[in-house]
Amino acid sequence: MFEIKLTHHNGYAWYDNGTVFVKGLLFVSDTLLKGPDLVDFFAECSNPEQFKKRLEKANGIFSVVVKKDTQLWVAVDRLRCFPIFYRKKDNIVRVGDDVDALFDAKEPKVCNREARQMFAASGYTVGEDTLVEGVNQVQAGEWVLFEGNGMKRDFYFRFSAPVRPVSYEQAKRELHMLLDRVGKRLVQALNGCPVAVPLSGGLDSRLIAHLLHENDCQNVICFTYGKKSDNDEWQRSKQVAEHYGYPWFFVDYENVDVTNLLSDEHFLSYCHYAAQYSSKFYFSEYFAARFLQEAGHMASNTVFVPGHSGDMIAGSHLRPYMRKYQSVNQIVDDLLYTHFNLVETTCADRRLFRKRLAQQLRQMRDDRENLYSLLECWDVRERQAKYIVNSCKLWEFTGNSYLLPLWDAELTAFFAALPFEYRICKKLYEDVLWEIFGMEGVLYDEDRKMTLPSGKMADMKLWVKRHLPFLRPKTPLFAHDPLDFQRLTVPMRQALAQSQNQRHLRSYNAIMSEWYLMKVSLA
């Protein structure tokens, strides 16, 4: 027996015909499907194989649940934009978009201790786990088949492809043309709605502004936030917005009052909505969203278009030595150093993390692909989906929708198939963007200073950090604080101190994770 409980209609509403339930939108080739058309797209599937093939063709952000005879098919898009959770109780499979809805009134939730340890160190649970024992999630790019007491899980997407032979200049030409197609699909999906761009001083969000301007989008606002001191990005953000003729707003976080933050029902509701016992809620843009909404700077049907995650798919996480990976354990070393560093961990913690990550990577591995691709597959499925993209739950919570044009399926496939030397430190991507921005007059000296370090010396420093973690200095949490987090997190740090939390926090992101774990207080 199946129970389907879909309650989150913010941003994108659920549509159904009684047996097929969908939300979001997608392109098949250049045809846009949403609402009833999206229902029909999946309703035409007569068996699981057809369902999987439809998922492989889908280019967009969506979730889908299909009841078919004695089976239930459940899938999320390549980035888990609209998370789906499931729980088996007795002979009933409960599927929904809110973990609490999977439990009866006053029914206790038991903590998954292993998931909690990994969440504390990274800011999200790993794999299908949630913080609640017995509750699992459909992973990014995954579909799940339920039938009777059994289930089958399978991935229809992984960020990986055979490397294709292409010259560097040809690849640059292809990327220019591809970005043009991405921009046209973006405008088609917007369908005339007003747009808000979270515009930093970096390249990805600047590319979004360029694509909108290039396609003659007029109803656009840009905004940035934080402090004006100790923050060199806001000036570039303002200059870019002014160049394209878009209104620009700066939300000064030094004026934000957080005195009663932890008793603010709006904030607490957002934390629950975004986190769902599996991902750290995103704190950075919360105050900016409230300001824009309360000041009347955005219409109710505004679509937010952030620059996630152009740099990552372009190769920002790749380093020269990764091409020479010889084993899964080397990837585990890098993942532990890079992504499981929010708090000071014990030897027992690290042994647990190593075992779990190695097991997960071996299950993911395709012997035909390069090992560095395996690292990126993990990154997309875990960090990008559960932390970076999950930040968009904020816009949903405010009642707005969002789009992720830099995760366009054609664009990700292009980068996945590029030779390693074109992607390392996002080389080709930056070259193309510098050409675009140089011609438009929005290329700045600071852009070239932000180029990622590479070379033998940089590799040696990384090797030491990865293999000799005890040499890692305990740097101050707020050594660089452009968002004024030292002040904004005071209520959370006070609450943690009162709870006698003695764990050493290595990052201000750890403050939010630790406070959330304390707040949910599972048995």
Image (tube, helix red, strand yellow):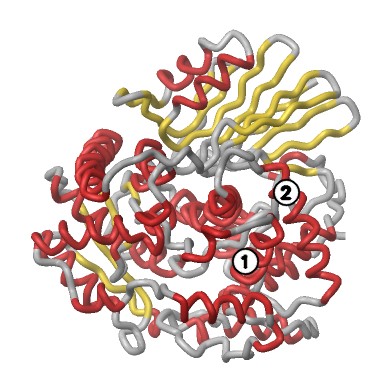
Could you tell me which residue is drawn at 52 percent across and 44 percent down? 79
Q: Position of residue 100 (x, y in %)?
A: 73, 46
Q: CA distance from mark 1 to mark 2?
A: 15 Å
Q: Which secondary structure, mark 2?
A: helix
Left or right of 268 in this view: 14: left
Callout 1–callout 2 Cβ contact below 8 Å: no
Picture quarter with the N terminus: top right
Q: Residue furthest right?
A: 90
- Label 2 CA crowd tier, 10 Å (few <14, some 14–19, many 20+): some
Picture quarter with the C terminus: bottom right
Identity, as a three-letter code, of the amino acid under mark 2: Gln
Q: Nearer the viewer, residue 194 or 296?
A: 194
Q: Position of residue 142 (x, y in %)?
A: 62, 35
Q: Which secondary structure, mark 1?
A: helix
Could you tell me which residue is drawn at 51 percent across and 18 percent down? 42
Numbered circle sitting on residue 334: 1
Identity, as a three-letter code, of the amino acid under mark 1: Asp
Q: Position of residue 241 (x, y in %)?
A: 17, 64
Could you tell me which residue is drawn at 39 percent across and 39 percent down? 164
Q: Is residue 403 visible?
A: no
48 versus 7 height, above or below: above
Numbered circle sitting on residue 104: none
Per the image, the residue denoted by label 2 is 360
Could you tell me which residue is drawn at 50 percent across and 25 percent down? 15
Left or right of 103 in this view: 137: left
150 versus 375 height, above or below: above
